[in-house]
Amino acid sequence: MEDIFQKKLSTQEKALRINLTKAIYGSFAEIGAGQEVAANFFKVGGASGTIAKTMSAYDMKFSDAIYGVGDRYVSEDRLQRMLSHEYVLLPERLSHRINETRFFAFADTVEALNFERTNQGQGWMGVRFQLSPGGEPNECVIHVKMFDTDSLQQQYAVGILGVNMIYGCMLLSDSEEILTSLMDGLTTRRIEIDMFRISGPDFKKIDNRLMALKLVKNGFTKAAMFGPDGTVMQPSEALYKKNVLVLRGRFRPVTHVNVDMLLTSLRHFKNEKDVDRSKIVVLTELTLNDLSPDGKIDETDFLHRADIICSLGQMVLVSNYFEYYRLVDYLSKITKGKKTAIIMGIYALQKVFEEKTYDNIRGGILESFASLFGNNVKLYIYPASKKDKELFTLKDFEHQLPDNLKNLFRYLMDNNKMEDIKGANINNLHIISDNVLAMIKNGENGWEKFVPHKVEEAIKEQKLFDYHPPLLPVENSTVKEMKDNLE
């Protein structure tokens, strides 16, 4: 008979297995629509073997009295207060169990669909847990969005997700296994996980930037984000009502051209009348398409690119939005109408205006442009160098368009939806990142002049992109001496 624990377990089977594992014991604290997690453990039986305490501080005053006053109740800050408060109580009140028990504290703070259905169901969920009795705790935190159109179904989905999370943290040792198991019994039509972080003494070697990539790669979300220090971020919190400037690229490696595109566009962006300079966020975006041109993602290569971008102090968005209009649509929902600008080279704009790109869209190019050039969205276009050393700009671009698109182009220009980037450093336009990468991999001299100094330092110190110091040229006399010895 097949061992039940070797196949993919249902929510009930996971909860029962935890209940029957004597070494696992902990507490549950749930605010809002997260009441179903602990309920799953009660329903399957044997809950006394797992649950030390359950509670729901549903009223704001009670919640503040226990966890302290906060600005927002559905936030990571509130979740952290809950985990910190609840976890320390376990060894303090259950000191007689310390030597044989792996303690955990589970917490969630969730906003389900309201009665009027005017909100987005979403929430924070976390586990602080030990992998060995008496050990220092680890921590796993996620942010979720819920898409069921019924609040009761959203609560059920949260219950399943919470069981998956506790089961993964307490009984699975591999971080990727923990992440992928979160969606057992669920679909991305019901739940989206757009932030995942795991840390602690048992997960020191885990790079959460890679976990962000895997969220997108596994289809759990369309976009994930991390900051210059590598800390994963929740996009809706980091970009909420911000003025966002985005540069998409492969960054393999970052060259002087990439930096110039950012800096010159930023100067333009700051001078826009409807941009609040104190609320500007600059994003560098890596798409799955740019990370996996052959269908496979090289995780080491991804981390090399991330290291380079982070060394320049930039935030990184990893997305599965191949088309620019989908990216803009995603950002617009978060920024709530604040100015958004996309930086692109003029050759990238050519692809944007290719009608065949939109063959699978009912409304074709017009439908996609409605999002790409929507309210408060603008494109900054970086020039290219022509053979005669003149610049290829929007003026030249118009002449190359087919006649049926010229009026559309003029409409966008007349309404300030596109703008040439002025002040570009034309001396760097010959730099091609693929050529620079080849020089680095081949151990050639001279690539350093094509990249910023910080990028050069990062590549050499961390030996990124297969970097190895070039061999010193051997003098003719030495070569002759070697040949003589061989003879």
Image (spheres, rainbow, N blue to C red):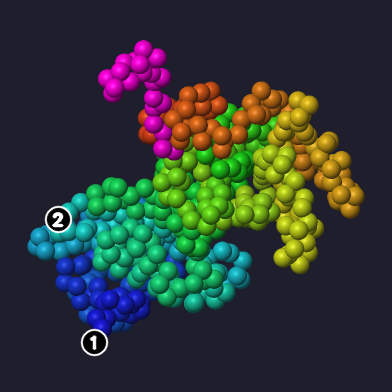
Q: Please report the residue visible at 44 percent of the width from the left and 30 percent of the height from the top.
A: 443
Q: Which of marks 1 and 2 is nearer the N terminus?
A: 1
Residue 168 pos. (x, y %): 31, 65
Toward the viewer: 365 or 434?
A: 434
Judged from the image, the secondary structure of the residue bearing numbered disc 1 is loop
The correct choice, above or below, for 370 with respect to 398 in the image is below
Q: Position of residue 95 (x, y in %)?
A: 12, 59
Where 198 sits versus 380, above or below?
Answer: below
Q: Name the residue under label 2.
A: 134
Residue drawn at x 76%, y 29% is 387
Whether 210 is among the magenta residues is no
In this orientation, does residue 28 appear? no
Q: In the rendered view, does 346 fall on the left or right side of 211?
A: right
Q: Position of residue 342 (x, y in %)?
A: 67, 43
Total tally of numbered discs in the picture: 2
Q: Quadrant of the N terminus?
A: bottom left
Mark 1 nearby-residue class (10 Å; few <14, some 14–19, many ≥20): few
- Residue range highlighted in magenta: 465-487
Q: What residue type is labelled 2?
A: Gly
Residue 206 in picture, x, y percent from top left:
33, 50
Q: For mark 1, what is the residue?
A: 1
Is 482 colored magenta in this rendering? yes
Give the CA separation, mark 1 to mark 2.
36 Å
| Nearer to the camera, 433 or 130 | 433
Question: What number is the disc on residue 315?
Answer: none
1 or 2: mark nearer the eye: 1
Tell me the element at label 2: loop
Q: In which quarter of the image is the C terminus?
A: top left
